[in-house]
Amino acid sequence: MNPYYHRARFLTSAANITQAPPDEGIEVAFAGRSNAGKSSAINVLCRQKALARTSKTPGRTRLLNFFILDDERRLVDLPGYGYAKVAESVKRQWQKELAGYLENRRCLRGLILLMDCRHPLTAFDRQMLEWNAYHGLPTHILLTKADKLKRGPANDILLRVRRDTAAHGDAVSVQLFSSLKRQGVDEAHGVLDRWFGLDKKNPGEQTEIRRD
């Protein structure tokens, strides 16, 4: 488990991209259907119990929440999408802000897409993958709540999702993940390390990222 991520601290929340921190450095965003386990995954990856707020009520994350790792690197918890029990007008506004962030944020290096391993590749998930492919944004899928399934069925789902996303090539990678059992943490850290440039540079060194 990489201790670097333990330094994560809450930076700010933004209702829209105009309230976000300056568009510089490197960001990695976490997205997924409501109640897919985004906040729990961020907490486990950062070895903190309450860095990102968790809730049993789907759709509680309504803002863009930024967490700083160092002067150049940030994690972003994006609003959940899908079945949250909120007004349609609110859902549309969330989707608008989510799309605005993903399309316009030049410092965004990659997207961690969380899916409940028991219900992967929903229509929303597939739409997100297609959108990321169109914009050239790499995606790493965490099949969350893997502890809810036995090893055999969980591995079958992993293989199925890998087959279903194979057309995206190296732009999409997939793994099993469990916040409860801390399964897959090292593998996820490896992806974050590459995107943040930590596999080549020391934390804190400036890295220039361009998205044309």
Image: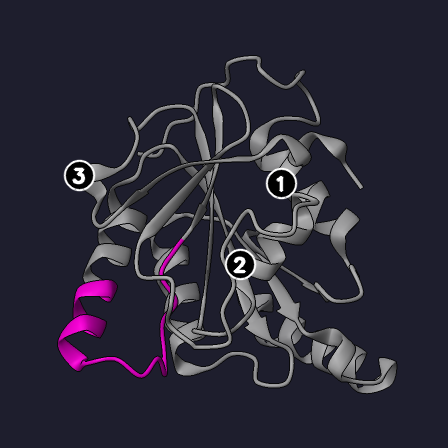
Residue 24 drawn above or below residue 55? above
Q: Which comes sooner in the sequence, label 2 or label 1?
A: 2
Specify the label residue 18 is tagged with.
Answer: 3
Residue at the spot 49% in from the left edge and 69% down from the top edge: 55
Specify the label residue 39 is tagged with.
Answer: 2
Q: Please report the bounds of the magenta region as a residue range.
A: 78-95
Residue at the spot 62% in from the left edge and 63% down from the top edge: 142
Q: Which comes sooner in the sequence, label 3 or label 1?
A: 3
Which residue in the protein does label 1 denote? Answer: 192
Residue 92 drawn above or below residue 27? below
Give neighbour class at mark 2: few <14, some 14-19, many 20+ (Cα, 10 Å). Answer: many
Judged by depth in the image, the label closer to the viewer, 3 or 1, is 3
Q: Secondary structure at mark 2?
A: helix
Q: Report the side of 172 relative to 93 (left or right).
A: right
Q: Quadrant of the C terminus?
A: top left
In this view of the protein, which residue sits in the foreground, 58 or 91?
58
Residue found farthest to the right: 151
Q: Position of residue 170 (x, y in %)?
A: 60, 52
Residue at the spot 65% in from the left edge and 51% down from the top edge: 49
